Image (tube, rainbow, N blue to C red):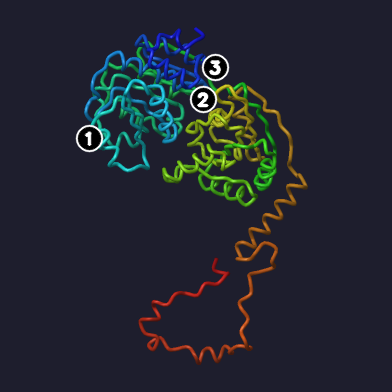
């Protein structure tokens, strides 16, 4: 099958696909859609960026259109679970895009947003509900949501669900679903626990695998640079001197690390923003919008965003720090080379990260081409200059000055310490107004 028209999809869906310029299905779509249309459960193993969302969204919309009925009150006809807010929003957008000529209602529910609008949306019922596990459990516990009439259940990015500790929440949600339903299970890798969960959920599933588990995208040019941990920021700034890094995602292991790296890039003249779990939804959306528009060259993210950012024009991925979980490397670099494009992944590796590198290369069965920038004199000079600037900033001084700015000179020599003591009022005489006096700011307090 080489055309979407060969898959048996309804005319409104084909019309929507044509308006988006999609004519040929990807391998995961060509293999999965016929089985899902036939009503079978599905186990799909595919790399990120291979078109998994359309592989389940299109046949679900076709099924709902073939049997139109009102959405159940407080419930949904199709439920999709996603590990992150960003991915949930993108899945919901895909359903709206593909179903634009069908008139179905699509809602997305995740944490970090107000409960009120979500409760009102659920009250009326929706055809397709896309949710993150935590917030959905909250609504189920408060009886704002009911899943007893769901016809299709999709678990997307199941392995990341496991990484984020969602295994038990998923089982709780499944307990609210009807026994008679269609289950679609998608994952980029298949660790043992995920295999067990698939065995619990799926009944005689069709199995689709378009790439061996834990393989990296073929169109990603991978590169490894050995460097001291304390000189990574200088090397990162040097990399961004190349205009080819026009839209780059930089990955760190921690939230504070993401903020520090973004701040250092801005100091080096590179427009950058950070995105992680401590950011509000508004902050995350603004950072993504700036990145998509190109006004921000670098988006610094933790692994929570590794599979939650679907932007086709990402030119590079930089692993500022290697991930603790080797599977996360596959997902990180899968943010580039999407939709048929090519991309480059650059990993910075310090000596203490060598065990993580060995785990990654063992998992992917690849040896990443490398170069050694340790003891690089140029980076050493840059690191020394940065350290001096940071010390000056902590002292409240301008870069290049030898100390904090001097206070404004007095007209005369000024009173002596003893005279100051004579002039100071005793506590009783100061009265209540002294307690309200604002402290005087001094550069050393910054």
Q: Position of residue 445 (x, y in %)?
A: 54, 68
Total numbered labels: 3
Crowding around mark 1 (Cα neighbors within 10 Å: few <14, some 14 to 19, many 20+) is few
Mark pair 1, 2: CA separation: 34 Å
CB under 8 Å between callouts 3 and 1? no
Instruction: Name the residue rendered at 73%, 42% in the picture.
Output: 374
Crowding around mark 3 (Cα neighbors within 10 Å: few <14, some 14 to 19, many 20+) is some
Instruction: Name the residue rendered at 38%, 26% in the picture.
Output: 96
Taking the image as shown, residue 106 lies to the left or right of residue 217, namely left
Screen quadrant of the C terminus: bottom right
Examine the rendering and report whether any part of residue 141 can be seen.
yes
Specify the label residue 33 is tagged with. none
**N-term-proximal mark, 1 vs 2:** 2
Taking the image as shown, residue 368 lies to the left or right of residue 182, namely right
Say which residue label 2 marks. Answer: 48
Which label sits in the foreground, 2 or 3? 2
Q: Secondary structure at mark 3?
A: loop
Q: Position of residue 390 (x, y in %)?
A: 63, 58
For this rendering, which residue is in front, 73 or 372? 73
**N-term-proximal mark, 2 vs 3:** 2
Say which residue label 1 marks. Answer: 143
Q: Is residue 31 above or below residue 341?
A: above
Examine the rendering and report whether any part of residue 326 can be seen.
no
- Please tell me in which quadrant of the rendered image residue 370 appears: top right
Q: Position of residue 296 (x, y in %)?
A: 57, 42
Crowding around mark 2 (Cα neighbors within 10 Å: few <14, some 14 to 19, many 20+) is many
Say which residue label 3 marks. Answer: 211
Instruction: Name the residue rendered at 36%, 21% in the picture.
Output: 101
Mark pair 2, 3: CA separation: 10 Å
């Amino acid at each position: 099958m080489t055309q979407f028209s060969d898959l048996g999809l309804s005319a409104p869906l084909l019309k929507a696909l044509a308006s988006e310029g999609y004519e040929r299905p990807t391998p995961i779509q060509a293999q999965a859609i016929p089985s899902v249309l036939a009503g079978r459960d599905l186990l799909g193993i595919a790399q990120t960026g291979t078109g998994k969302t359309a592989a389940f969204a299109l046949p679900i919309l076709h099924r709902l259109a073939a049997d139109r009925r009102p959405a159940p009150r407080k419930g949904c006809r199709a439920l999709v679970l996603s590990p992150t807010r960003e991915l949930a929003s993108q899945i919901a957008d895909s359903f709206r895009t593909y179903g634009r000529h069908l008139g179905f209602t699509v809602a997305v529910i995740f944490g970090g947003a107000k409960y009120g609008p979500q409760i009102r949306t659920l009250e009326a019922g929706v055809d397709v509900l896309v949710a993150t596990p935590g917030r959905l459990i909250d609504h189920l516990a408060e009886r704002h949501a009911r899943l007893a009439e769901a016809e299709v259940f999709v678990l997307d990015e199941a392995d990341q669900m496991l990484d984020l500790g969602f295994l038990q929440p998923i089982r709780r949600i499944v307990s609210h679903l009807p026994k008679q339903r269609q289950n679609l299970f998608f994952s980029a890798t298949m660790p043992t626990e995920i295999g067990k969960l698939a065995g619990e959920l799926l009944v005689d599933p069709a199995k689709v695998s378009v790439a061996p588990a834990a393989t990296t995208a073929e169109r990603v040019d991978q590169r490894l640079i050995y460097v001291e941990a304390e000189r990574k920021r200088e090397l990162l700034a040097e990399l961004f001197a190349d205009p080819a890094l026009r839209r780059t995602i930089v990955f760190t292991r921690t939230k504070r690390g993401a903020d520090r790296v973004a701040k250092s890039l801005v100091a080096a003249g590179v427009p950058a923003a950070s995105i992680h779990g401590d950011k509000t939804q508004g902050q995350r959306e603004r950072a993504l919008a700036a990145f998509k528009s190109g006004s921000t060259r670098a988006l610094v993210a933790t692994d929570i965003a590794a599979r939650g950012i679907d932007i086709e024009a990402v030119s590079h991925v930089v692993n500022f720090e290697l991930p603790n979980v080797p599977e996360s490397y596959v997902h990180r670099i899968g943010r580039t080379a999407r939709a048929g494009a090519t991309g480059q992944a650059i990993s910075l590796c310090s000596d203490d990260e060598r065990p993580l590198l060995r785990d990654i290369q063992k998992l992917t069965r690849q040896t990443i081409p490398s170069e050694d920038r340790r003891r690089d004199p140029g980076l050493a000079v840059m690191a020394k200059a940065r350290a001096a600037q940071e010390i000056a900033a902590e002292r409240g001084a301008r870069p290049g000055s030898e100390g904090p700015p001097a206070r404004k000179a007095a007209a005369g020599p000024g009173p002596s310490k003893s005279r100051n003591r004579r002039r100071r009022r005793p506590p009783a005489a100061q009265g209540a107004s002294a307690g309200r006096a604002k402290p005087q700011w001094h550069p050393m307090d910054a």
